[in-house]
């Protein structure tokens, strides 16, 4: 492909509001240009932008130009509104869905060792990162959660196989990996309460919900100094008191 056609592709990608597929890019030309030629031109454009503040990336929904992560701190100065930060519970729940999908809400709770609040799931669904793709053939037919193409696009991933490999299978390790990508992750978010039971620690119960039991899960050292003991009362105990 000659330089003119590569410049056409480059311009189209820079002006596009959404990622473009190779099929869409082929519509730029009247002459017959193969998908292989376009793919080769895209790889050459990637190399040409190696030393720039922008980069050409291949994601789940196509190709797009985006600013490099190293530029974010400077670009943030132009935007008075800060992006939302997500609590540890949100990130852990997202990580479990990403690495174990499809997964039910009950299975997420079993892995985390704590009830998953409706607010956590709503944040992930509102952000467009997870969705219900079906129902498990068991009692109650619970919904099966999986990540979306929007999730892959926001992490600049082509597919689920592109997720970072984990040396530690714990939800927090996965959450840290995802948090270091393009999302804002606040490890000290106060959306949730830390609960202690016996010699182990349970990671967060939503402030607006009560849990009937205190279960346990190991917490990372970085938050161990700020844990305080909380013992939620169950509804049954409330009835007995009455």
Image: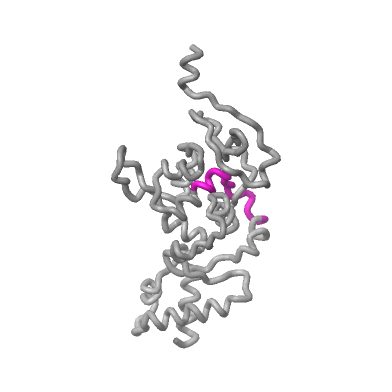
85 is higher (above) or lower (below) than 39? above
Q: Which residues are drawn in magenta?
A: 77-93
Q: Which residue lies furthest to the right in this view?
A: 225
Task: Pick the residue in front: 144 or 1.
Answer: 144
Residue at the far front in the pictured view? 199
Q: What residue is shown at x 55% (from left), y 38% (from top)?
A: 216
The answer to which quarter of the image holds residue 26 is bottom left
Q: Which colour scheme is used?
A: one colour
Residue 208 versus residue 210: which sits nearer the camera? 210
Q: Which residue lies furthest to the bottom in this view?
A: 2
- Residue in the picture at 59% in, 53% down: 176
Question: Which residue occupies 47% across, 69% down?
Answer: 58
Residue 165: image location, x then y, percent: 53, 62
Whether residue 69 is in magenta: the answer is no
In this rendering, position of residue 175 left or right of residue 226 = left
Quadrant for the N terminus in the image: bottom left
User: Whole-percent x and y of residue 219?
Assistant: 61, 44
């Amino acid at each position: 492909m000659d330089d003119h056609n590569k410049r056409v592709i480059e311009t189209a990608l820079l002006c596009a509001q959404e990622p473009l597929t190779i099929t869409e890019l082929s519509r730029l030309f009247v002459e017959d240009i193969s998908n292989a030629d376009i793919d080769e031109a895209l790889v050459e454009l990637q190399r040409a932008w190696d030393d720039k503040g922008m980069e050409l990336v291949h994601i789940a929904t196509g190709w797009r130009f985006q600013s490099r992560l190293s530029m974010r701190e400077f670009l943030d100065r132009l935007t008075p509104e800060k992006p939302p930060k997500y609590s540890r519970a949100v990130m852990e729940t997202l990580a479990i869905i990403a690495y174990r999908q499809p997964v039910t809400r009950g299975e997420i709770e079993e892995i985390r060792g704590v009830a998953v609040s409706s607010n956590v799931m709503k944040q992930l669904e509102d952000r467009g990162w997870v969705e219900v793709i079906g129902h498990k053939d068991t009692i109650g037919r619970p919904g099966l959660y999986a990540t979306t193409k929007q999730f892959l696009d926001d992490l600049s991933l082509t597919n689920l196989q592109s997720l970072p490999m984990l040396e530690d299978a714990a939800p927090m390790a996965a959450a840290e990996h995802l948090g270091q990508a393009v999302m804002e992750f606040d490890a000290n978010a106060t959306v949730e309460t830390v609960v202690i039971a016996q010699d182990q620690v349970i990671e967060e119960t939503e402030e607006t919900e009560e849990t009937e039991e205190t279960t346990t899960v190991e917490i990372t050292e970085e938050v161990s100094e700020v844990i305080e003991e909380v013992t939620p009362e169950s509804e049954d105990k409330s009835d007995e008191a009455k």
